[in-house]
Image (spheres, helix red, strand yellow):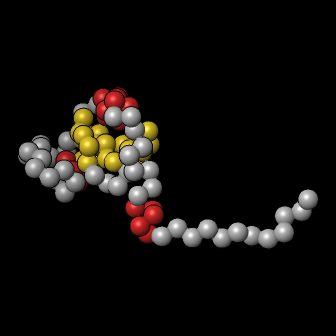
Amino acid sequence: MAYQGTRQITVSKADLAHLGEGSVAYLREMGSDELKGKFPGLPEIAPNTTLWALFAANGQPILLSDERDRALAGALENDLIPVAIH
């Protein structure tokens, strides 16, 4: 049987905003300057400090760690599938 056509799938911005919600978290290594805007109420961090940040699929911050493995464990403890952002 031959394929007869194409099928276009339309995804709204609202649909994309909720994609992975409650099941996916992303892990990212970030510098102290970049973290200030992402984690409200974050105490002062020494300049040039690098930490691992875990975010929900919608961008909500979940946790910070000085070790990648601890951040990954945080995702798994919350039944989230971690993905890395480079």
In the rendered image, the vertical position of residue 36 relative to residue 5, given as above or below: above
Is any part of residue 82 visible from this angle? no
Query: Furthest-right residue in view?
Result: 1
Q: Position of residue 57 (x, y in %)?
A: 38, 51
Query: Left or right: 8 with respect to 44?
Result: right
The residue sitting at 31% across, 47% down in the picture is 55
Query: Left or right: 28 with respect to 46?
Result: right
Is any part of residue 77 visible from this angle? yes
Residue 28, quarter of the rendered image: top left
Residue 71, quarter of the rendered image: top left
In this view, the residue in front, 49 or 84, is 84
Q: Position of residue 12 (x, y in %)?
A: 48, 70
Q: Position of residue 49 (x, y in %)?
A: 20, 41
Q: Position of residue 43 (x, y in %)?
A: 8, 45
Query: Left or right: 57 with respect to 51?
Result: right
In this view, the residue in front, 50 or 17, is 17
Residue 18, quarter of the rendered image: bottom left
The residue sitting at 44% across, 39% down in the picture is 81
The residue sitting at 45% across, 62% down in the picture is 16
In the rendered image, the vertical position of residue 10 relative to residue 33, given as above or below: below
Q: How many marks?
A: 0
Q: From the image, which quarter does the N terminus lie in? A: bottom right
The residue sitting at 61% across, 68% down in the picture is 9
